[in-house]
Image (tube, rainbow, N blue to C red):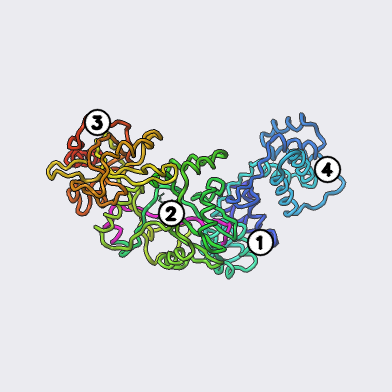
Amino acid sequence: MISATTKRLEMTDHLVNLFKSTPGDVIDKVVYLTQGKLYPDFAGIEIGMAEKMALRALAMASGLSMHEVKQELNRKGDIGLAAENLLKTKKQTALHKRELLVQDVYYALDRIAGTTGAGSVDMKVRTLSGLLSDAGPVEAKYIMRTVTGKMRLGIADMTILDALARAFASKDARRAIERAYNLTSDLGDVARALSREGIEGIKEYHSKVGRPVRMMLAQRLERAGEIVEKLGKAICEWKYDGERIQIHKFGDEVSLFSRRLENITGQYPDVAALVRHNLKVNEAIIEGECVAVDPDTGTMLPFQQLMHRRRKYGIEEAAKKFPAHMYLFDALLVEGEDLTQKPLIERRVRLRDMIAETNGFRLVYSLISDNVEEIETFFESAIENGCEGLILKDEDSIYQAGARSWLWIKLKRSFQSKMIEPIDVVIVGALMGRGRRSGSYGALLVAVYDHERDVFPTITKLGSGFTDEDLKNLPEILSPYRLEHKHARVESKLEADIWFEPALVMEMIGDELTLSPVHPCAYNEIRENAGIAVRFPRFTHRWRKDKAPEDATTVDEIVDMYKAQLKKIG
Ligand code: AMP
């Protein structure tokens, strides 16, 4: 009946009748089966039986040869229709047939999905053949389509929700039912709650550990001023350029879900370990952005770095090379208490209280403000540190599961630019390295030349592009220029571990020039309280021994480059 119609309304009518006549203890299974599944998508379990295997089972159940079964498939062009036809002929001669219940079908399919290892093919074929022997021809049609993943009735989640509302509550309940679905992404679980407790059960429905909450997303506006007008005083957070992860913890068990609600725990053993050590409660659902970090310099790497983990093997190595850090921004559940209806400002306090902050597991950088200028400066510092911008969030916002909400508004740059020319910089300081770089320098603090004032303002921290050989040699190369304190002609807002006399010039390039509150190069020239810095800087491996420090790129040149970069975009 359902397969005969493509009209959503008719489909819903059929579903309403089906759900009404389904006993409460199997309603969840019926819901999954109508979509050709056994579990909600996030469980990642597929029946996935190869066509050839399914045909073997059909041959067994119908008493025909593989050749005959294949011929029928070729004639019908559909494995379901082939099964229906073959079993119709056979069933007429069968003596008696046991009535097949939904649970019989479900558990048999579940056994097929769950059988693995040696001999599993034969087991699967036998299980399916047994099921087909008990099935009527029409049932066999759907069973065959389901096991081979061809059960595409095209019933959308929203259609199921419509039908559930009509079967167990009223039209007015539709919103509440959808909200419940957004909290667990599990149509079967929602159906069970509805059939057991009606709409009251749905009002009480809450998020549950192990079932991913559909994530709340942000709207976008172009200017900080517009956002402040809309939200007033807002929680402004760095928008990290990584992968969103929803963390579920129960005891020692940790599950990580992606934005598309896939279980990605296997890709992030390092994050799972961080959670076990630093999330101090027994039961929780929290969210954050996961970012790959260069262990030697501590700098955040662009999103693409994490994509090396989208594979089966070599994850441990990838995690070692570029470990993931978690920057947390929300708490949805703690010790059984659903927090999604609490205001964000309170959820953040709860979040802070349940974690032990470490370098790799911490709250997002944030600022509470309605001062546009202050927010713009904060935005620039986010960009300079490898973030995409900011997300401004209403202090009182609830967690609107599954919504792209105006309570969260992102502020990104309206352009993406490229720094095409390398620049020559002077080394004025160094920061000690960690990890593989302990004992050497993690990053160099480098400066350009301010011709007018005859000083060297810093422009960036340079930690990339060095070979192991470079790293070994740097302390020695720089030792003749070491100072006890900052050189009088160096301008820096950052504290270096070691200071140098401006002497050595090297060439570097970056992704682009950005405004920065941290670096004094061209301070106040483009914007008040901001200088210009280089984003994602890299050593080009060219020492400019031919250049004196005063021959380094000048502040004026940097200002011109910055303006040219804007023009190129505009
Ligand atoms: P977009 O993908 O541009 O719609 O931006 C939304 C995404 O930004 C989220 O799904 C997160 O992956 C990411 N994100 C980074 N930092 C934050 C943050 N502080 N709050 C919320 N989302 C964030």
Q: What amino acid is found at the position of numbered circle 3 in the picture?
A: Lys
Give the Cα distance between marks 4 and 3.
94 Å
The numbered mark, 3 or 1, whose residue comes first in the sequence reads 1
Q: Considering the numbered disc 2 on the image, is that residue within a helix, a strand or a loop? A: loop
User: Circle 4 sits on which residue?
Assistant: 92
Q: Position of residue 108 (x, y in %)?
A: 74, 48
For the residues carrying marks 3 and 1, which lies nearer the camera in this image?
3
Instruction: Indicate the quadrant where residue 84 lies.
Output: top right
- The amino acid type of the residue labelled 4 equals Gln
Q: Which residues are magenta?
A: 208-228
- Look at the numbered discs 2 and 4 and tell me whether their residues touch, using CB distance below 8 Å: no
For badge 1, the amino acid type reads Lys
Q: Earlier in the sequence, mark 2 or mark 4?
A: 4
Q: Mark 1 sits on what residue?
A: 20
- Confirm whether the magenta stretch covers residue 295: no
Residue at mark 3: 545
Report how far apart the C-alphas of labels 3 and 1 lie in the structure: 83 Å
